[in-house]
Amino acid sequence: MAGPLEGIRIVEMGQLIAIPSAMKWLADMGAQVIRLESVQRLESYRTDSLYHNDVDGEFWNRGANFYEQNRNKLGLTLDLTRDAGRATLRDLIAITDVFAENFTPRVIRNFGLEYENLRQIRPDIIMVSSTGYGFQGPWANFGATGPATEGAGGLAYLTGYKDGGPVMSEIPYTDYTAGEHTVTAVMLALMHRLNTGRGQFIDISQTQTCSATIPEALLDWTVNGRVQERVGNEDPAMSPHGCYPCAGDDRWIAIAVDCDDAWQSLCRVMRRPDWAADARYADALGRIRYRAELDKMLAFETRAHDNHELMARLQAAGVAAGAVMDSADLLFNEHLKERRFYEVVEHHPDTGMPPLPYAGRPWKLSGTPAIPPRPAPLMGEHNRELLANLLGRTDDEIAALEAAQIIGSAPLAPRGVRRPSLDEQVRQGRMQRYDTDYAQRVRQAFNIAE
Amino acid sequence: MSSGALAGVKIIDLTHHIAGPYATKLLADFGADVLKIERPSGDPARRLPPFYHDQPDSGKSLPFLYLNTNKRSVTLNLKSETGPAILFELLADADALVENFAPGVMASLGLDDATLRAHNPRLVMASVSNFGQTGPWRDYRATDLVEYALGGLMYIFGAYDREPLKHALHQAQFKAGTNLASATLMALYHQRLTGAGQRVDVSIQESLASALRDVTNNYTYTGAVRRRQPNHTGDLTRLRAVSDGYVLPNPGIGASLNWQTLVDFLEAPELDDPRFDNASARLENAAALGAILDDIFAAKRKQEIFQAAHEKRFIYGVIDSPQETVDNPQIQARGYYVPVEHPDLGEITFPGAPFLMSDSPWEVRAAAPRLGEHNAAVLGEQGYSAQDLAYLRASEVI
């Protein structure tokens, strides 16, 4: 089975998450995605979070983030600051359906890669640009990080403990929000091209995709003139509704009581008939009024329980509850395992890395499932194949490009980031803990041969 | 007919609340004909706060008004005998059915995937649910909070020494809704090429778990388990309070940081100190550095330092309130907020195009529908007479 997007060719000039995560999902579903890099400019996802924290040898082919964002893509290096690099890219554009990038408009203009340029070469091309604040407008050339667009879009202001300032998530959250909307946008453009034969330019403002997901607060302002404030984990209509401590080190459970039946069930599971009988807590209005008191009482009770065990008992009683899962909980979770959510990817033998599981996709398509996973490319891994087979370059031409360092398979200025030892990371509080038998546990859970 | 990317695509929309309706909103706003089938009591999201002028009527939920632009509403009691029969008639020429009932509900109504696709082999049947259509947790209950816990984002979110936190509002629902739109479009693309329909299964839990950077990988690569980070007060990229809000400083990238540049930019000679001029010294004197930085930033103004930073290509960010983001000159220049005329409520300013498409733009053709607003028109198209409609209404089918 080839995936619904078989036959679509995408050239990706992406970096980090916003565009790479989106193109990965399109690659998963069968599109041929050619990922551009250069040996002159080493992406930070190739230099940090390395396998075994090992900065020796070809470390740039062992970066966790690079593998996570670039599954199922082909790797081509090109130095676009020079004519020969840009000429090669133009030849590639001529046979490409989608060109996707997330640099600032300044960079794209300097390379002559605006939509107007591309459509001279390929009239029906779809170009998608993903920028922090949008390709046009007074802030167009302002670079942005995920946290910056989470801030500008209005989400960060609303998020945080009730008594404190804004809190950001510890991942570039809105890069993913933008990436998810980018997949939608590219699919819309592909449908439009089927209908009309025409390509187009898609301008993604990461800030706007963030705002699109918080209409409750934005409309409360535009319609009611009210600026919503931070409420931590509270919900205006539910109580108890929060995150409570459990037995063990940094173990927690989230509980959401969304109706009176669920409240009675919670009291039963916690063996507190006195709460169940208390008229003050009988309905949501009362439970919301006594929210602080209830949270304290509940937190005192949950402390004695294992979070997964308590979740199972609460769920069996019809209460929405979830253990706050850490990375090991996720990897070894029975539900995600049965759904084959994590997929084992075999790495190139040169990396010395064993096959490892990676998060898959949030969807399953029964008739056209995702393709079997291939690892992200080594740097320049498919240079020769792509240049010879797609563009008809001769061995001599390819050798000349290599000699001029227009293409290559190793960064010119390699510098890997060695993180502190695991003991030091735990001491600094950066990591919760580490397991020494993790490799064996992963092998066993995913049936990976030694 | 619309000129959007999905002109001519017909969607039967059985979704309610947030995740499903956001998916069908994306499809409707880009041109699909979306028929929203509501239970006679209406989509429960009609009662989601906040409300227009705090009036809690079913037509005045602001999230509902946002999530249901460009849709037509037909009421149908799927638990009645006639309800499913009418649905089958509507499905005959539909491209996709989108739903977000708890897994198993569709089958219990006689509307399982196999039956529906036997009736219309081109049909894409797309579902979003808390944990997907299969697996031991399929029937677990969840809210956005519970999804944050089980999707893995919560454990690494919040203060080091406090309880884990979730984002404000309903991010898990919107995330899954976006993914449902994408997956449905992939199946529709395949349908347009081959004529074949198929089943789409989107999980809210997996929507969160597939958008975590370096979480499970940290474990498989080194054995380490990530957690909420301590408050490194000397961290140069840490969120800082300024006199009129908060900014996200970003002095440059890691080791390439030139300390003097930063001292000059912040106009802070007190930072010109050997205790701070290299990375390891800064780590050693983090508390002192943090205190000085707090003071320096407290005297700055948000927009001034943000603009000055970008002149130097330091990628600072701002934390904007709902009011500030609506007033943001960049967002205004892009025309993001748009007036939508509502027949009962007048003009309302909505967040508009989530992204700009040059040849098939986002558009609002109609405000969110009243409950059952299109019963007569839609069932009339199917050949039901005024008399039939009266009978269906009397027997509580519509």
Image (cartoon, rainbow, N blue to C red):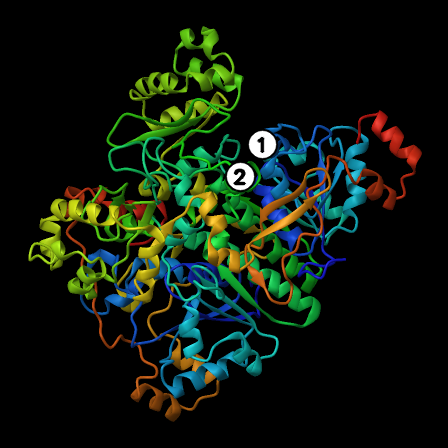
Write the residue at 31% across / 80% down: A408
**Above or below, comparing residue A338 to residue B102 in the picture:** below
Chain letter for mark 2: A
From the top left corner, tell me how far across and down residue A13 is, in percent: 42, 70
For mark 1, give the secondary structure.
loop
Q: Amino acid at mark 2?
A: Glu
Q: Quick check: B380 left or right of B140?
A: right
Q: Are marks 1 and 2 in contact (CB under 8 Å)?
A: yes
Q: Which mark is residue A221?
A: none
Q: Quick check: B370 left or right of A294?
A: right
Q: Amino acid at mark 1?
A: Leu
- The quadrant in which the C terminus of chain A is found is bottom left
* Residue B238 seen in render: yes
Residue furthest bottom as drawn:
A396
Residue furthest left as drawn:
B274
Write the residue at 37% across / 53% down: A148
Write the residue at 27% across / 53% down: B221
Q: Quick check: B319 left or right of A202?
A: left
Chain letter for mark 1: B
Report which residue position mark 1 lands on. Answer: B48
From the top left corner, tell me how far across and down residue B10 is, in percent: 73, 52
From the top left corner, tell me how far across and down residue B296 is, in percent: 21, 49
Quarter assignment of residue A369: bottom right
The lab-note entry on whether marks 1 and 2 share a chain reads no
The CA span between labels 1 and 2 is 9 Å
| A54 vs B233, nearest the viewer | B233
- The quadrant in which the N terminus of chain A is found is bottom right
| A355 vs B380, nearest the viewer | B380
For mark 2, give the secondary structure.
helix
Report which residue position mark 2 lands on. Answer: A216
